[in-house]
Amino acid sequence: MIKVAVTDLEHRKAQGIFAAAGREGFECFPAPPGEEALARAIREQGAAHAIVGVEAYRGPLYEALPRGGVLARFGVGHDGIDKNAATAHGLFCTNTPGALNDSVAEHTIALLTAAARHLAAVTRTTSQGQWAPCVGRELQGKTLAVIGCGPIGRRVAQIAARGLNMKVVGCEVAAVDVEELRKVFGFSRICKEFPEAVAGANYVSLHIPSLPTTAHFMNSSRLVLLDRHAWLINTARGAVVDEAALYDVLARGGIAGAALDVFEREPYEPVAPGKDLRTLGNVILTPHVGSSTQEACDRMAAQALRNIRAACAGRFEEMDLLNPAVRSQ
């Protein structure tokens, strides 16, 4: 049996897929997510590969896995994995592109509708025994700015434009097929500049990766460009938003509100004293559950295992490889 360590949360999310992998010669066992404990479990169990979540791994994990092993990210974002360290230790790094697109896009739309109809506030007051109806907004005819027109951003646009009859403006710095984005996904136009994309937008949804160049992309200088009636939605990565700056603009009423599924620190904790987003009434918070549907979790587990299977068979061209330089090691 080929042993595969799977961090606890990810193992629970797709137990059926990991259990069924036994029929193909894989023994997938749950392991703690902390790096020291995970590395120890890998050594003790003799695991050749590991499937991990969103945690950051910076040292011992790369020494614990044998050369030729796979470090598979259960998800798309891979800023928690040090690809250079993995390559130096002869490890293949993979992720699961495409597996969670629909789930994250649907959660983005859920946050959008929750913001428009004040669902968090009315749920709270009603559960407290109050009867305090409030007036919301229709989404039809409103403008959504999608920042980052990759697969998830495109799916969000498609649902918003085709299903909710919203006007969708895209912001994308990479070369894209503008005509396809219009015809297939419903974008009304594509901008390269952020200020142009968000001008007059009622909702601004972030779908950009976490990179050194996108750290605190939504800072004070960009937040002030949003209309004071606009909502900011983030289902991308927490690091792309300066939460201290966001707190300040929300507290003074600079924008209408924020709906966030990802945070700079997870589990969530304030990035600065006195700037706890949980204390603000115009904030909707969910605990990084955008990709947490059973369908997406099963697809991510199956895709991670396919990557490991391909590595074992030497079919490297079939892998979702994040560090192709490892093949020359």
Image (tube, grey):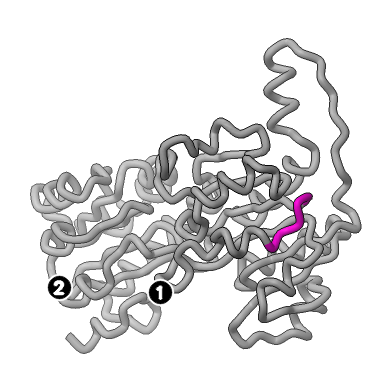
Residue 230, x across and y down, in percent:
75, 52
Q: Tell me, yes or no, whether the two marked residues, 2 and 1, touch with CB atoms within 8 Å.
A: no
Magenta span contains residue 226: yes
Quadrant that contains the C terminus:
bottom left
Residue 157, x across and y down, in percent:
74, 65
* Residue sitting at the far front: 252
Magenta part mainly helix, strand or loop?
A: loop
Q: Amino acid at mark 1?
A: Asp
Q: Which residue is mark 1?
A: 320
Tell me how far mark 2 sits from mark 1, CA to CA: 18 Å
In the rendered image, which quarter is residue 13 located in? top left
Q: Residue at x 18, y 58 (%)?
A: 61
Numbered disc 1: secondary structure: loop
Residue 4 vertical position relative to residue 98 in the rendered view, above or below: above
Residue 109 vertical position relative to residue 78 in the rendered view, above or below: above
Q: Tell me: 98 left or right of 64.
A: right
Q: Which mark is residue 277?
A: none
The label nearer to you, 2 versus 1, is 2
The span picked out in magenta is 225-229
Q: Which residue is mark 2?
A: 89
Q: Amino acid at mark 2?
A: His
Q: Residue at x 14, y 73 (%)?
A: 89
Residue 21, x across and y down, in percent:
34, 54
Badge 2 local density, few (<14 within 10 Å), some, or many (20+)?
some
Quadrant that contains the N terminus:
bottom left
Q: Tell me: 138 left or right of 329.
A: right
Q: Residue at x 9, y 48 (%)?
A: 44
Residue 318 vertical position relative to residue 224 in the rendered view, above or below: below
Badge 1 local density, few (<14 within 10 Å), some, or many (20+)?
many
